[in-house]
Image (cartoon, coloured by chain):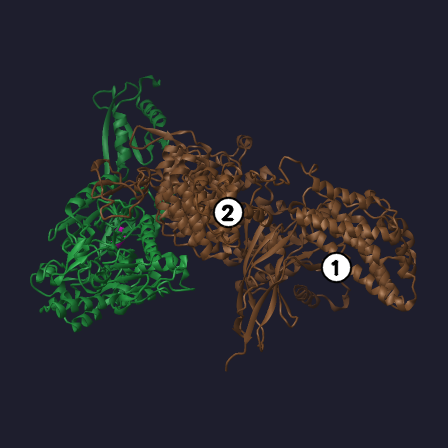
Amino acid sequence: MPEIKVTPLGAGQDVGRSCILVSIAGKNVMLDCGMHMGYNDDRRFPDFSYITQNGRLTDFLDCVIISFVSNGEKKVLLFCGVLSLPYFSEMVGYDGPIYMTHPTKAICPILLEDYRKITVDKKGETNFFTSQMIKDCMKKVVAVHLHQTVQVDEELEIKAYYAGHVLGAAMFQIKVGCESVVYTGDYNMTPDRHLGAAWIDKCRPDLLITESTYATTIRDSKRCRERDFLKKVHETVERGGKVLIPVFALGRAQELCILLETFWERMNLKAPIYFSTGLTEKANHYYKLFITWTNQKIRKTFVQRNMFEFKHIKAFDRAFADNPGPMVVFATPGMLHAGQSLQIFRKWAGNEKNMVIMPGYCVQGTVGHKILSGQRKLEMEGRQILEVKMQVEYMSFSAHADAKGIMQLIRQAEPRNVLLVHGEAKKMEFLKQKIEQEFHVNCYMPANGETTTIFTNPSIPVDISLGLLKRETAIGLLPDAKKPKLMHGTLIMKDNSFRLVSPEQALKELGLAEHQLRFTCRVHIQDPRKEHETVLRVYNHLKGVLKDYSVQHLPDGSITVESILIQATAHSEDQGTKVLLVSWTYQDEELGSYLTSLLKKGLPQSSS
Amino acid sequence: CSAHLRWELPQWQHEDLSTKKLRLTKPSKSAALHVDLCKATSPADALQYLLQFARKPVEVESVEGVVRILLEHYYKENDASVRLKIASLLGLLSKTAGFSPDCIMDDAINTLQNEKSHQVLAQLLDTLLVIGTKLTENPSVRMRLVEVACKHLTDSSHGVRNKCLQLIGCLGPVEKGVAKEAESQAAKDVQKIIGDHFNDQDPRVRTAAIKAMLQLHERGLKLQQAIYGQACKLLADDYEQVRSAAVQLIWVLSQLYPESIVPIPSSNEEIRLVDDAFGKICHMVSDGSWVVRVQAAKLLGSMQQVSSHFLEQTLDKKLMSDLRRKRTAHERAKELYSSGEFSSGRKWGDDAPKEEIDTGAVNLIESGACGAFVHGLEDEMYEVRIAAVEALCMLAQSSPSFAEKCLDFLVDMFNDEIEEVRLQSIHTMRKISNNITLREDQLDTVLAVLEDSSRDIREALHELLCCTNVSTKEGIHLALVELLKNLTKYPTDRESIWKCLKFLGSRHPTLVLPLVPELLSTHPFFDTPEPDMDDPAYIAVLVLIFNAAKSCPTMPALFSDHTFRHYAYLRDSLSHLVPPLRLPGRKLVSSPVSPSITPHEDPSQQFLHQSLERVYNLQHLDPQGIQELLEFTIRDLQRLGELQSELAGMADFTATYLQCQLLLIKALQEKLWNVAAPLYLKQNALASAAAKQILEETYKMEFMYSGVESRQVVIIHHMRLQAKALQLIVTARTTRGVEPLFGMCEKFLQEVDSFQRCFISELPQMQGSFVDKLLDLMPRLVTSKPSEVVKILQTTLRQSTFLHLPLPEQLHRASANIIEPTGESDNPLRFTSGLVVALDVDATLEHVQDPQGTVKVQVLYPDGQAQLIHPKPADFRNPGPGRHRLITQVYLSHTAWTEPCQIEVRLLLAYNSNRSKAAAKIAKSTWNESPEALPQPENGIEGTIPFSKPVKVYIMPKPARR
């Protein structure tokens, strides 16, 4: 039986390090190529050796698909589906095609380079990929458009759907023949200020592989959070205070920028807004370019003005932090553990007019986490004590689909099986149960390295001869899309093709002579009358029962029902018993056996 | 006609030249076409001819002939595309006004029989549909066509089936009686036939089937409840157009059978059909296609019969986090409020989830209505969000409890990213404001929007605040503070804010009372400095307080001395904002018009009528006396108009009329006409100026006032006629020779004639008037020479009596006020000459009917050049009855100037006598029988009346730098 095999190398009952191996109809596809940030050795990379024990990866994998480039504002683990890519393609060695969307392809090298710098230059690690490797790796990348069907080889095709979440994030449909798998990557079913909602058509895949980060959460409307955020910022600025918003470079930073920019515009505010230069600045550049990937508002208004051409938001300079008067600053990194955001924080923390807004999760041990949990005195390096007088606010802006969103996507796509990845096992369990209960489809949640096999029931296209089709449709009523229809014909399997032709044609093609198969059956009836009277009684009886069929009484004393022949003779020994001979061809088997059983019941008594 | 020529040529060639005859018959179009088609050698040729033919109209008489020719060719034609074109032409021709297509119906039906091409078949059915819709009164025709359609329903092409269903939907019998009489099987149950195609394999046919069903419903057939189940299945269709149509069908059924009971599948329970349908449509609000989502969200609004339990579910989205129940931000805000604590700002973990939820009980796919609006309002497409807001509004208007619940969501929409959505939600909130009281935290959010830079949003918000109920005095204080902030940020909002505070004060007197000392900053022991009377913010506070004091007699006791003085001042200067108050220890301020007095008892109204009576009665005074009396009366009336704003329109109107009369009398003074020839000049100048002015004034009277009835129009036209007579007389005296006079006289007489015809019903009331006398003399006038005519006119004009001007109930003068540009700026608007600069113009218009068509902006440059700008219809907003607002941009350009100079901007009211109400009304009533014979009395006299004060704008076109 045909099957689809899925093996998560990362992200199976786990968050981060997305890497999933799918083999479908003999094709092997690797989905995402993430990295685990918890480790500093080779364990941070997915276990690529699993894919092929010996031999080259290129021979085994047909293609690699990267669904998105994330920022990972949520946990220390960068969920990024791309960080291991150079390692994978250059160091492990893979020369096949790598597919990703255009924005992803554009942002990818910057992100990788940035990451490489942090790891190699700052932490001084070796055995890591080099800049040249990143360049070489990017040469293997093929960029795809949304809804563009890309033919990887003759049988394997992939198609990207919009996924929201971050710029360039996409869901991929992988299709071989009529078997298909949809891999969602990270997606968001509710639109935000800069991106739209994920959308997929009713493609009815055999398997839907979906992320399940928020499997057990139903989120509140975004509007309240946005409003609170804006109000906080507005009030602080009006008071003359400074607002610090620590962010990661991509994703939420842009959303918050747009939010503040439009608010400033609407409310006619004058206080300056700054964002830290570097990665964010470069990323904003790409947002400007990929307008078609953003939400309705930005797409509609960009003719007048590109929303990412910020009017009120300017690049930040270190010296600005000491300027008097109100201001808002977006600074990296997002958890206040190092860098610019921490520097600014130290400068501003002493003033109760100022405010820091944490737009995401902070990991234990970071300054961000400490102040969020209410600590007011922080020990900095050099035994300095920093007293935090500024207001500390927390706002969660997350761009993953919640439980309802996941269910909505499943409803849209109508898959036959669902597989959950990228989430905690306990939460998945809940969602799995819900999915099975509400959609009546199988749901799987394999752990890393565990292979799930899904049996498919692919439909096989068969060519039918036009003559036969016309003949068969002429018999019945109009064809109905929803109901299967019974047809008689001969299936010829020849040269890897299937054809359905009429029996005569099949015989002709194969050069065979036609054989007739007839069944005959004798039925004994107790009837003292003469033969022809018995025949007449049988005739009347059959005519009464089989109203829709043509029942004929032939002059030679036999009866035909359609093509079935019935003859009566007296029993050679017992004249009171008549023997009915029923004979039918193989094609009329159904009617023939029905007739026999009917006659076996005997004739009605009251007939004469 | 080229077709004609082409046709003639071959005729000449074929005919024997010796038998040439002069042909006078009109060449028929059909013949021309016939020849064209015969000549066509290839199908492409024929197609070209047909295409050319289709461009020209065909007269009613020749339609049938053309159709016959076309049909003849149809049968001969082998090429499907040509047959297709012929079929479409048949449909086009059947549409010809005045042509009854029953004569060609049989032929059209016959063509169907042998047609093999599906496309042509579909086109032919379309033609039949056209024929059928023209002959809807004939049931037998309809029956026949429906039968034909049913026969072709089994066709294998979707196009043909599509058309058949459309035909059945449009022509199928809707009356019960007809259906019973019908012998044929086909026509018996159209609903069943259409219903069978709900499961067609082609989505286009499925859509057509649903549409046909809806068409039947629109035509008055009561759909059977049985199709509800089928329709529900169609909601899960793969194609969006099917789903969209199915949503509509379900909605129709829910309106037809709201109370029927339907079972819930997979359980034993049953619910009302309307509830079930509501649930299903709610489900479609999260459909994959936004078209369906818009459709669903829109329809939800009109399902008012749905039970409140279901309705309230639409706003409910059970939140959870890590499998624990979580409260929404709304719930938290409400709790904070009810516990008396002000929101302290969000702490981390403030929204920490509380109780565990039973995993089994969580239903992730919303069953039915759950959270439909929550999804709709958060949708990606603003079209869906607007539809959801509209639906919310309609449902909230019919259910107060729902209104209360949806408040939080509406308030949230005030922060939408699209302005239209924000505006829509503010309007919605205003519409339901009777049912609701805002909590403080909600008010806070609402007021935050006051800083919006869009004027529309702010004004909509002011309107909203006018009719909002606030629950606490803190609320009022907050509102006042925010409004004052708004005032400092956008000083142009002054009027709107004052108005808003007026209503806020009068609605909440008891809440304002405890705030008064603080607002007026009075102190029990110390005198506080007197605030600046011209400060708009201080005026705003006073407006709030005075309006509250109106129904709160204890309040004035808290006022300090200067407050009373300020009251007196404001009562006079801003009487529309400050109500009359009964102040202790003071002379009662006379309350001029208490609403209980009817207009007739109102002294000022009486005064108006008396002064008019006086004028009308004194017919036989000496000219000098009449003049004086008129002058006095006009002065009185003008002053009255200034004092009494509600009578201003009336007073102005009559004053203008009297002014015209006065001018006429002055111009006709006998003394002056008898002086020697050299002095004519002065007299002529005076008289012609008077005539001109009267004409202008009459146009003003006719077009500038709203509420003018035909009674007044007659008088106005009569006055105009007199002015024209005067003009004629003056011209006669100044021009030499009679030649030009002939034409003028004739024209004048024509005008008299048309006046008579237009106002024939009013003539009896015009005894002794100019026109009355003139009509008596008409036979003589027609035959006399121009000089005599002039003489007669002169005497008649002098002898005729002064007509009484009846006054309508309500009369308002159109007025406009340009708010922006203010004309106060000393900074010239600089721009490069030859390029264009946009000037924002903002004006309020009152009592202007159809401002989109009539109001123009005029720009006068210092060199005398004038520019007329027609604002776009979208630039006009309608904030209230009788009020309009024009916010537009005027583009200026000029060649370079050496120094800045002022241009004038003003608003004009354009008129066109053809368009006037009276003319239209008369055309309808008097000349109903022969509309084409109606003479246009003053064929399209167009002109403009300036009706706003001009505003000066300082501009400076700089020479372009090279």
Q: Residue furthest front?
A: B525
Label 2 sits on residue:
B542
Q: Nearer the viewer, residue B220 or B805?
A: B805
Q: Position of residue B139 (x, y in %)?
A: 58, 37
Q: Residues within 10 Å of mark 2 (few under 14, many from 20)?
A: many
**Residue A508 lies in the magenta stretch:** yes
Image chain in brown: B
Q: Amino acid at mark 1?
A: Thr
Q: Residue furthest left?
A: A54
Give the answer, above or below, for where B6 lies relative to A503: below
Alpha carbon of mark 1 to alpha carbon of mark 2: how far?
A: 87 Å
Q: Does residue A234 appear in this view? A: yes
Residue found at x 60% / y 43%? B135
Q: Position of residue B522 (x, y in %)?
A: 45, 46
Q: Main structural element of the magenta stretch: helix, strand or loop? A: helix
Label 1 sits on residue:
B25
Of all chains, the one bearing label 2 is: B
**Which element is circle 2 on?**
helix
Give the answer, above or below, for where B465 lies relative to A566: below
**Which element is circle 1 on?**
loop
Q: Are marks 1 and 2 in contact (CB under 8 Å)?
A: no
* Hue used for the chain lettered A: green
Q: Nearer the viewer, residue B88 or A197?
A: A197
Locate residue A155 relative to residue B816 in the image: left or right. Answer: left
Give the answer, above or below, for where B281 lies relative to A461: above
Q: Position of residue A406 (x, y in %)?
A: 26, 47
Q: Amino acid at mark 2?
A: Leu
Residue stretch in magenta: A506-510
Locate residue A190 relative to residue B529 in the image: left or right. Answer: left
Asked whether the residues under marks 1 and 2 belong to the same chain, the reply is: yes
**Residue A62 lies in the magenta stretch:** no
Q: Position of residue B826 (x, y in %)?
A: 54, 68
